[in-house]
């Protein structure tokens, strides 16, 4: 019961992915909690983007729908069978027992909208009313809750306060601190850590990427435990973007200005949303790293300068996106300000 969300090139949609790596403890906790019959009605699955939160949510949903009576459920989560009726229904979004709430697709642009709106959350009310007489489990995956606008968040909160019988909310978040405290307080937190090098390599091998050569170590290190980040580095030119970015910040002279324009052209080009998001995160991480290092060294003025720059960059990028301003000029301005601050 969902639109198929955008998936990175080379990735497998979480609803279709039958393997998960590096989160064995979280899987064991969910399986044993469900089998006890005392599981919480809402679980907040926390962790950085691209480490497997959504895949875990769909695995757990498959486990519950396959074993609707907790006492009869196995003690571990098995790999979902994609050829089973439940597996096919979840993969196609046709399950009457699961609702996947994500940012809706804009029919005009074909891209995901900026937020999960209250209209999307109202689908949950309809979902529960349509299935209330079946006696089956009803599972809602909010992916991620960070994208809920305020009205949508308040609407979800009302449902969480009085959850229907045999209902389960799997609430995903990349940044739990940004959620309403009242939503967090009604969920059981389950923290997932970034993947270590070995499970990250296994996950990429499962997707058909056997990392070899001089770039393998760079990709593993730069991915920070995220399969999504690794795919951006491999399939979207992320390694080159990062190297060019660092060269611009460290360099001087006419060649730097030329590289700034080349980078801005690449990030502002058609179908560049993924790599532009990658660059935003890259720039934000660099600014915050400078601020932390300055604070630790006792250089309060420098730390404050980078803190102000962080707020300014966030505001400019938000305004640029909201008003569809010239992205290239926004990027050039950001690079100029970062070089000046450094």
Image: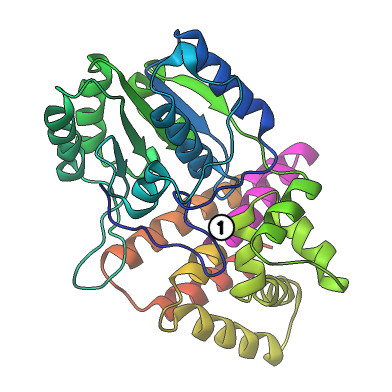
- Write down the region rendered in magenta: 280-303
The magenta stretch spans residue 17: no
Figure check: 286 above or below 174: below
Residue 163: give x, y in percent of width and height: 25, 17
The answer to whether residue 138 is above or below residue 33 is: below
Residue shown at 76%/37% (left/top)?
296
- Residue 136 in which image quadrant: top left
In the image, residue 296 lies in the stretch drawn in magenta = yes
Q: What residue sits 23% from the left and 20% below the top?
A: 135
Q: Is 251 rendered above or below residue 60?
A: below
Say which of 325 and 191 sits in front.
Answer: 191
Q: Residue furthest right?
A: 214
Q: Main secondary structure of the magenta part?
A: helix
- Sort mark 1 into few (<14), some (14-19) or many (20+) by Cα contacts within 10 Å: few
- Asked where in the image residue 125 lies, by quadrant, the reply is top left
Q: Position of residue 80 (x, y in %)?
A: 52, 42
- Where residue 215 sits, quadrant-wise, is bottom right
Q: Is residue 117 left or right of residue 314?
A: left
* Location of the C terminus (image quadrant): bottom right
Name the residue nearer the viewer: 81 or 120: 81
The residue that mark 1 highlights is: 281
Task: Name the residue nearer the viewer: 129 or 281.
Answer: 129
């Amino acid at each position: 019961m969902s639109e198929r969300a955008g998936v990175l090139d080379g990735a497998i949609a979480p609803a279709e992915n039958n393997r998960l790596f590096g989160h064995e403890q979280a899987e064991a906790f969910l399986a044993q909690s469900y089998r006890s019959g005392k599981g919480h009605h809402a679980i907040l699955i926390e962790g950085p983007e691209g480490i497997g939160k959504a895949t875990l949510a769909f695995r757990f949903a498959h486990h519950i729908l396959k074993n609707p009576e907790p006492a009869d459920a196995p003690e571990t989560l098995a790999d979902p069978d994609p050829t089973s009726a439940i597996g096919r229904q979840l993969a196609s979004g046709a399950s009457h027992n699961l609702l996947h709430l994500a940012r809706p697709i804009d029919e005009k642009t074909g891209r995901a909208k900026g937020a999960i709106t209250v209209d999307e959350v109202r689908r949950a009310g309809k979902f529960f009313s349509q299935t209330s007489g079946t006696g089956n489990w009803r599972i809602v995956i909010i992916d991620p809750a960070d994208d809920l606008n305020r009205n949508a968040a308040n609407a979800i909160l009302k449902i969480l306060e009085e959850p229907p019988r045999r209902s389960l909310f799997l609430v995903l978040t990349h940044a739990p601190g940004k959620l309403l405290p009242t939503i967090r307080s009604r969920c059981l937190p389950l923290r997932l850590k970034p993947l270590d090098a070995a499970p990250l390599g296994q996950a990429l091998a499962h997707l058909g990427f056997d990392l070899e050569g001089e770039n393998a170590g760079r990709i593993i290190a730069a991915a920070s435990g995220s399969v999504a980040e690794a795919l951006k580095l491999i399939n979207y030119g992320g390694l080159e973007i990062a190297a060019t970015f660092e060269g611009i910040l460290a360099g001087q002279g006419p060649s730097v200005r030329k590289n700034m324009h080349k980078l801005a052209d690449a990030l502002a080009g058609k179908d560049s949303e993924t790599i532009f998001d990658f660059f935003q995160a890259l720039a934000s991480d660099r600014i915050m790293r400078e601020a932390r290092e300055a604070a630790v060294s006792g250089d309060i003025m420098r730390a404050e300068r980078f803190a102000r720059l962080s707020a300014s960059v966030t505001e400019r990028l938000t305004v640029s996106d909201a008003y569809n301003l010239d992205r290239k000029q926004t990027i050039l301005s950001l690079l100029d300000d970062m070089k000046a601050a450094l």
